[in-house]
Every structure is written in C-alpha cells, then in structure tokens.
Image: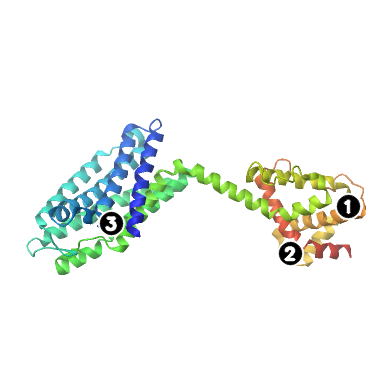
Amino acid sequence: MIETLTYYLCVAGFAGFGYKLIEARHSQPVRTMWFLAGFGICIATGILVLTPAMEALLGPGPVVEWVVTLAGDELRLAAIGFAVAFTQSVWRGEGARPAPHAWFTAATMVLLGGCFALSEPRRTGAETVFSSATLPFALGDKVLFLLYGLVSFGLLFAVFVRSAWHAEPGPLRTGLWLLVAGVGSAAAWTFWDVGDVVQLARTARIGAREDLPSSVLAAVTIGFVTAGATLSAWSPAVSSVLGRLRAYRAYRRIEPLWTALRTAVPGIALDPGRRLAGGAEFALYRRVIEIRDGHLALRAHFDPDLPARAEAAAQRAGVREAEVAATVEAVTLAAAIEASRTGRRFDRTPGHEAEPDSAADVAAEAAWLIQVSRAWRRSDALVAMVSG
C-alpha cells in the first residue's frame, strides 16, 4: 500500500512541478525554474528507482546491485543540491551564488560513487554484504551521504523557516510551512540510514531494500514538497470548495432563526421554492438579507426597555459574558415575534433601537446570526423570565 501511495505521489509530483514550471515561466528567472524542475525530477526518480517494484521489473543481477542502488543515492543527492540552489535563487534573486554548493554537491557525488565502487557490494538474498577489506569504503559511502544531508538540510530548514515566519498569512505562508514539513521529513528519511550504518559496522551487511518506515518517510516527503511547491496551482480550487462548505454550514445553522422570522413575516422569503439557487454562498447571502428584512419588519414590535432586562436576566441565568449580546438579541427578537402575533406595538424612540451594522460583510453577519441562532434555543425561558 505504501509503495502504491509513493508511486501516485511521484506521479502527482511530476505533474505538479510541470504545471508550476508552466505557470511561473513568465514570473521567475529561467535558471530558478530549472532548479525547481531538477529538484522535482531527481526526488521523484530517486524514490522510484529504489522501490521493490523497480527491482522486480529489472530482475536480479548487476544492474540492480550496482546501477540502481547507486543511482538512487546519487539522485537523492542531486535533488537536495537542486533544492538548495532553488532556495538561494528565490531568496537572493540575481545575487544568488549557487556555485559553491553546486561544487560541494558534485564533489560529494563523485566521492560517493568512488566509495560505492570500491566497496564492491554483493547481493545475497534481501541483503547486501561487504568483505572486511571493502567495509571501510561502504561505511564512507553512508557517512558521506549523512554529512552532506546534515549541511544541506540545515541550510534549507533555516531559510524556509525564516521565510515562513516573516511571510504574510495566505497561500505563500502555507506553502512555505508545507516545504518546512517536507524538509523535515526528508531529513528524517535521510537520517533513518543511521541505523543502517550501525548495522553495517557491526555485521558488514545491510538491507538491500527500503524498509517500511523509510518508504513512509519517502511518501511523506514527496507529498509535502509537492503540495508546498505547487500550492498556487491547487489552493484556489480547494479554497473555493471550503468556502462553499463553510457557507452551507452557516446556512443550515441560522435556519432556526430564519424559520421563526419567515413564519412571523412570510413576505421576507424571496423565493421559497429554490433554497440553494445560485450556490451555497448566494443562498447564505439571501438568507442573511431575509433575516435582516424580518428584523426591520418587526421593528414596531420591539420593546425598547427589554434589552436591559434581558441582559440582567441572562447574567442571572449564568450565560457566559461572550454570549450575552447574542442572547439579548435572541430574547428581544422572540419577544417581538410574540408581540407581533398579539398585535402589541411600542413607540420607537430614537436611540433605543439597535440597527444592523451596514458595514459588516456577509461572513461577519452570518457569524453573528449563528450566535443568535444558538441562543435562540433558550430564548423562551428567558422571555418568560423577563416578562414575568
């Protein structure tokens, strides 16, 4: 299952980075985009070549024992190098100097390849074994990889955390924190090899395949990095879906209040037969307007002295301070509906009547009406208390 997930995430990574290259080709320097492309291709390919399915496809022999194993490690090194170069290019712009770290990466890759060749690995079942004479080179291979990862991931982590910390809230900041998580999981994936180094030093043999925790970390890494680097490609669609869900939830939560007002003032319903016409956002907007229309239609039936009594009654009933205002609104509205039913009217003195905030947007209005609707459930008892 983990292997299948890794495959799908690699495919998503290729697609996401490809889209990102197309999207940003006019807003980012060509060099920066090539660094991003190099990172995406190397990390996804490096994961793919080390999976058991690739080994089964190629079959046993020197290709798997030498070429695939070395290619997987070299591709992971190259991916880290491209990630550092991309980060420097974005962070410093034209003043970026990726050459020093590029030389560091190239030298590490050459040394890694040399140590791997001199270690003369031999495949025995599910393990790779080394002779006592070549064991130091095998250990050097692993230690070089870990040292390179320590330096590179430290640099990446520092830059991404600093950028995310100072970024304004929004997609950019979210994407940077996803990249921070990706760097953290990539570091954990890399340093999972510490156990292999200890085993290698003790027994001169090491597991030839990625174990389950390593596969999980690989899948998590490609998932976080792809999500963070391509956030601008998919975040608008996700935000739109979440916005519709939030609107529908608010629409349903203010329904008890709307139902009571529609019963008292049937004319406020603009189109009773089409509840969600125009989508959840428009339906919520319409419902907020209808509630406010009902409030205005009942204004002659609001008792101007009731809010003070309702506030005192709410405090005596143990209503939390943050909910008192919404409770007062619910009580006065319930009382106005009852006064409308019995035909009782009050003189409206200027200053006594609280008008809706005309500057509030639909989201703010809906949030307030949700609080009032929640307080509506206990309004009958409080109305009886203040009326008695």
Label at residue 340: 1
Q: Residues within 10 Å of mark 1 (few under 14, many from 20)?
A: some
Answer with left or right where residue 267 lies relative to residue 70. Answer: right
Quadrant of the snapshot with the C terminus: bottom right
Question: Which one is earlier in the sequence, the residue at label 2 or at label 1?
Answer: 2
Disc 1 from disc 3: Cα separation:
72 Å
Question: Which one is earlier in the sequence, the residue at label 1 or at label 3?
Answer: 3
Amino acid carrying mark 1 in the image: Ser
Task: Identify the element where label 1 is drawn.
Answer: helix
Quadrant of the snapshot with the N terminus: bottom left
Q: Residues within 10 Å of mark 2 (few under 14, many from 20)?
A: some
Question: Which colour scheme appears in the figure?
Answer: rainbow
Q: Is residue 337 above or below residue 277?
A: below
Question: Which one is earlier in the sequence, the residue at label 2 or at label 3?
Answer: 3
Residue that appears at 83% across and 62% down: 383
To which quarter of the image does residue 163 belong?
top left
Q: Which residue is mark 2?
A: 319
Q: Position of residue 384 (x, y in %)?
A: 85, 64
Disc 2 from disc 1: Cα separation:
27 Å
Disc 2 from disc 3: Cα separation:
55 Å
Q: Residue furthest left?
A: 133
Q: Is residue 169 visible?
A: no
Label at residue 190: 3
Is disc 1 in contact with disc 3, using a CB cutoff of under 8 Å?
no
Q: Position of residue 214 (x, y in %)?
A: 30, 60
* Viewer-side label of 2, 3: 3
Answer with left or right where residue 371 lies relative to residue 59. Answer: right
Is disc 2 in contact with disc 3, using a CB cutoff of under 8 Å?
no
Amino acid carrying mark 2 in the image: Val
Q: Position of residue 256 (x, y in %)?
A: 74, 56
Amino acid carrying mark 3 in the image: Thr
